Image (cartoon, grey):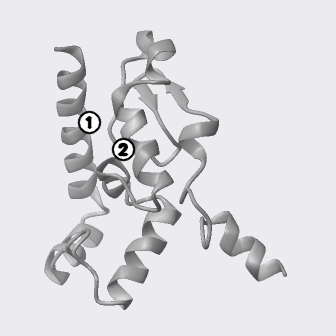
Amino acid sequence: MNNSRNSDDLGHGRLPLCREPWESYYILRRGILPCCHGNPIIAPLNEWASAWNSPQLREIRRHLSQGKLSPYCLESLGCPIVQRVLREQRENGKSSALPRRPAVLRLLNRLMFRVPGRLVRSWKERRARRRIVS
């Protein structure tokens, strides 16, 4: 019984895959995120009230309610639900959702204390902020 409870917590066998975008969102100084593992911001801090029903959040909810990961979710690789879905897809031979980086790049990222990955994420976040502001 305990194993089924753990698998349900990660969205196994239920729709939507994740309930977070329906239950809450995160308001931080850098902006609004739909979940704690969110990568790019979806709205600036001063638009917190309108972000709840924003087109981006509705798209994320639509994908999740269909049992799929949204493009936003696929960018949030720290999420345990995204990791589980991608692992299952790799095991089933359906790894078209997100290509795996070459082993050399993964090793280089680890050896450099994950600085390259952090730089790429901050660059994507700044680019997303510019799109929201303009």
Question: Looking at the rendering, which quadrant does residue 8 occupy?
Answer: bottom right
Q: Position of residue 117 (x, y in %)?
A: 25, 56
- Crowding around mark 2 (Cα neighbors within 10 Å: few <14, some 14 to 19, many 20+) is many
Please identify the residue farthest to the front as the structure is shown. 66
Could you tell me which residue is drawn at 44 percent across and 64 percent down? 82
Please identify the residue farthest to the top as the structure is shown. 46
Q: Residue 39, which numbered label? A: 2
Pointer 2 or 1: first along the chain = 2
Question: Mark 1 falls on what kind of element?
Answer: helix
Q: Position of residue 74 (x, y in %)?
A: 33, 57
CB within 8 Å, label 2 to label 1: yes
Could you tell me the amino acid type at mark 2?
Asn
Instruction: Give whichever of 93, 120 is nearer the camera.
Output: 93
Question: Mark 2 falls on what kind of element?
Answer: loop
Could you tell me the amino acid type at mark 1?
Glu
Could you tell me which residue is drawn at 28 percent across and 82 percent down? 94
Q: Is residue 32 above or below residue 107?
A: above
Q: Where is residue 85 in the image (x, y as percent from the top left)?
A: 44, 72
Q: Residue 125, which numbered label? A: 1
Q: Residue 94, which numbered label? A: none
Question: Looking at the rendering, which quadrant does residue 29 occupy?
Answer: top left
Q: In which quarter of the image is the N terminus?
A: bottom right
| Residue 118 relative to residue 68: left or right | left
Give the CA distance from mark 2 to mark 1. Answer: 7 Å
Could you tell me which residue is drawn at 54 percent across and 31 percent down? 26
Instruction: Give whichever of 106, 1 is nearer the camera.
Output: 1
